[in-house]
Image (cartoon, rainbow, N blue to C red):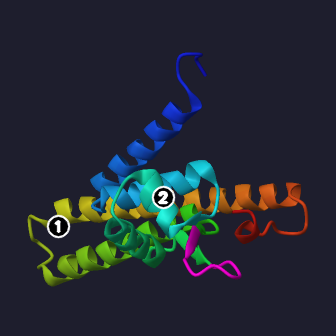
Amino acid sequence: MSNDITYDAVRTDFIEKTGLITQAEGLPRIAGRVFGMLIFDGEVVSFGDLATKLQVSRASISTSIRILEERGLVKRVTKPGERQDFFQLAPNPYATMLERIHKRNRSIQADIAETIRSLPANSEALGRLNAHANFYASLDAAVAVALSELDTSRNTSAMLQPTAPKDYADDA
C-alpha cells in the first residue's frame, strides 16, 4: 500500500465500491455498503453503529439488513444484556450468492425450454432460442464449478483453523 493512501481511505473505497456493485445488481446501494463494511471489518456491528459509521438513516439500515438477511448474506446476533441487535457476515455468504444464481439460471433454462417445446420443429426462432438456452447452460456449469471450488477452498481453510469455532458475538 502506498504511503499516501491510508487504511481508512482504502476501507472507505472498498465499502463504496461494494455499494455500487450491489446497486448495479438491482439492490439498494446502502445494502451493498453494509455488506462491504461487514466484509472489510469482519466484526459484529450493532444496528446503531451501522447507521453511524455509514452515515445513513436507521430506516435505510433496517431495509438493507432485511434484504441481506433474506439473501442469507448477513446474520443477526444478540449479546446478553444488550437490547439492540448486532450483525455479522453470514457463514459462507459467497456460496449463498452462487446458489441463488444457480437457482435463477435453472428457472431461466426451464422457461426457455418451455418456449422451445411450444414452437413447431421448423420455427426459425429455434436456433436462436437454443443458443440462448446454451448460454444459460454454460453459465450454470460455470456457477457449479465456482461452487465446487469455493467448497474446496473452504474445506482446505477449515483444516488449517483451530478446532473450536470463534464466537464473534463475544468480540464486539
How many numbered marks appear? 2
* Disc 2 crowd, CA 10 A, few/some/many (<14, 14-19, 20+): many
Looking at the picture, which amino acid does disc 1 mark? Answer: Leu
Q: Position of residue 158 (x, y in %)?
A: 81, 61
Disc 2 on helix, strand or loop? Answer: helix
The residue carrying mark 2 is 35
Q: Residue at x 42, y 48 (%)?
A: 18
Quadrant assignment for the N terminus: top right
CB-based contact (under 8 Å), mark 1 and mark 2 = no
Q: Nearer the viewer, residue 133 or 49?
A: 49
Using residue 146 as the reference point, say whether residue 163 is left or right of it: right
The magenta stretch spans which residues? 78-87
Amino acid type shown at disc 2: Phe
Decide whether residue 81 is among the magenta residues.
yes
Give the answer, above or below, for where 142 lies relative to 102. above
Mark 1 secondary-structure assignment? helix
